[in-house]
């Protein structure tokens, strides 16, 4: 019997409810090549500030709020770039809800170049808790090719300013952008680790209708990552962030996030499950190679015909088996019998394997 544990953040019994208030296109200083915000959010018109309370109450009536941290989240655009008067109106309504203990947190998303001291002061004055920055990349060539309109230094300075003000920082990154490659994306992730955000989101670059990237794609000037490439790279990033105890809030876009306007790119409704499957596939194969000898000429011959049992925590057993049974199917090409068992004493990606020699083989 052999045990293997990979560093993982333990599951929390405290859940979160983000009440999303979308403000599409508002305040964005330029159109990045990959962006068609209306397609991604499925929202064309921003909710008026005087409707925030009604929207929040309606959302909560339909939600199980027990043991949940409840946040009002201004998403969908560059919140700190909309007119100051509008910012103040939205934040004032959210702050009232927070002071009345109807919500616990206020969070928003914005761009690095719309963070300055005046913005920081405004956010802290309205008790904003979390700022999500659309970093996308920390490589200047990639940022320029995507027409982000700012440098990596601007992004780094914005991150430090948010943290220094006592707000939580979430960094949104995108893999497979124009002029990028896997090594460039990994270097961006390494820089993210140095900043030590309170969480990250990993999104693959997708080609949406009516975006500049669509034109580049149709002219064969841009090739998106394949699904396999995006999954493999996302698995590498996941392990990198987990090793540094940085929570990953999301991997891949939500299944309903404008996929009706999707032209090309590595979209999959179960993208995270594919990434977890890839991680487990590597863990299991590496474990068997290590146990039987990586350099052994007869490595696979030693496995063929035997039986194997793999134990893992119930919360991750499906990932161990693999999306649509991928990992189990691959192991079944070597072993006579492959069994997966739930074991509550194992945590995260800990697992135990037992290989029994089949006398009939």
Image (cartoon, rainbow, N blue to C red):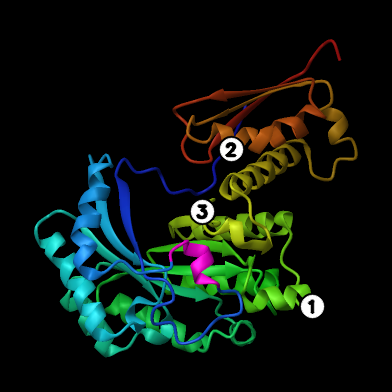
Q: Earlier in the sequence, mark 1 or mark 2?
A: 1
Identify the image quadrant of the C terminus: top right
Q: Which residue in the protein does label 2 denote?
A: 319
Question: Do the residues under discs 1 and 2 have CB atoms within 8 angstroms?
Answer: no
Q: Cα distance, mark 1 to mark 3?
A: 28 Å
Residue occupying the far left of the picture: 100
Q: In terms of depth relative to the viewer, which is nearer, 249 or 110? A: 110
Residue occupying the far top of the picture: 360
Q: Is residue 322 magenta?
A: no
Q: Cα distance, mark 1 to mark 2?
A: 38 Å
> Which stretch appears magenta?
36-43
Q: Nearer the viewer, mark 2 or mark 3?
A: 3
**Residue 30, percent from left and from top:** 50, 86
- Neighbourhood count class around disc 3 (C-alpha, 10 Å): few under 14, some 14–19, many 20 upward: some
Question: Do the residues under discs 1 and 3 have CB atoms within 8 angstroms?
Answer: no
Q: Residue at x 68, y 32 (%)?
A: 325
Q: In terms of depth relative to the viewer, which is nearer, 352 or 334? A: 334
**Residue 132, percent from left and from top:** 38, 69
Please tell me the numbered disc located at residue 254: 3
Identify the image quadrant of the N terminus: top right
308 to 96, vertically: above or below: above
Would you say 221 lies left or right of 50 here? right
Disc 1, SS: loop
């Amino acid at each position: 019997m052999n045990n293997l544990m990979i560093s993982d953040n333990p599951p929390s019994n405290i859940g979160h409810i983000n009440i999303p208030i979308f403000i599409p296109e508002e305040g964005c200083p330029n159109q990045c090549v990959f962006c068609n915000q209306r397609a991604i959010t499925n929202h064309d018109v921003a909710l008026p500030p005087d409707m925030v309370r009604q929207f929040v109450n309606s959302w909560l009536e339909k939600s199980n709020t027990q043991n949940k941290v409840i946040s009002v989240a201004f998403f969908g655009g560059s919140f700190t770039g909309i007119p100051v008067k509008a910012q103040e109106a939205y934040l004032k309504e959210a702050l009232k809800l927070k002071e009345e203990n109807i919500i616990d947190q206020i969070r928003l998303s914005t761009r690095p170049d719309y963070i300055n001291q005046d913005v920081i002061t405004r956010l802290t004055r309205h008790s904003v808790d979390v700022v999500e920055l659309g970093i996308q990349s920390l490589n200047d060539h990639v940022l320029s090719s995507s027409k982000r309109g700012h440098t990596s230094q601007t992004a780094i300075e914005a991150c430090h300013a948010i943290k220094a003000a006592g707000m939580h920082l979430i960094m949104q990154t995108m893999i497979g952008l124009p002029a990028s490659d896997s090594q460039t994306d990994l270097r961006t992730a390494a820089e993210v680790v140095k900043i030590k955000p309170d969480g990250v989101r990993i999104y693959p670059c997708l080609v949406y209708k009516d975006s500049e990237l669509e034109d580049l794609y149709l002219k064969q000037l841009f090739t998106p990552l394949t699904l396999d490439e995006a999954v493999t790279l996302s698995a590498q990033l996941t392990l990198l962030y987990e090793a540094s105890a940085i929570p990953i809030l999301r991997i891949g876009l939500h299944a309903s996030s404008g996929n009706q306007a999707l032209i090309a790119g590595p979209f999959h409704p179960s993208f995270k499950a594919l990434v977890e499957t890839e991680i487990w596939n590597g863990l299991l194969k590496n474990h068997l190679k290590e146990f039987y000898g990586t350099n052994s000429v007869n490595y696979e011959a030693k496995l063929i015909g035997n039986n194997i049992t793999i134990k893992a925590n119930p919360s991750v057993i499906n990932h161990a088996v693999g999306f649509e049974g991928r990992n189990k199917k691959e192991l079944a090409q070597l072993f006579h019998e492959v069994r997966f068992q739930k074991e509550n004493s194992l945590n995260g990606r800990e697992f135990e394997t037992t290989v029994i020699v089949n006398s009939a083989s």
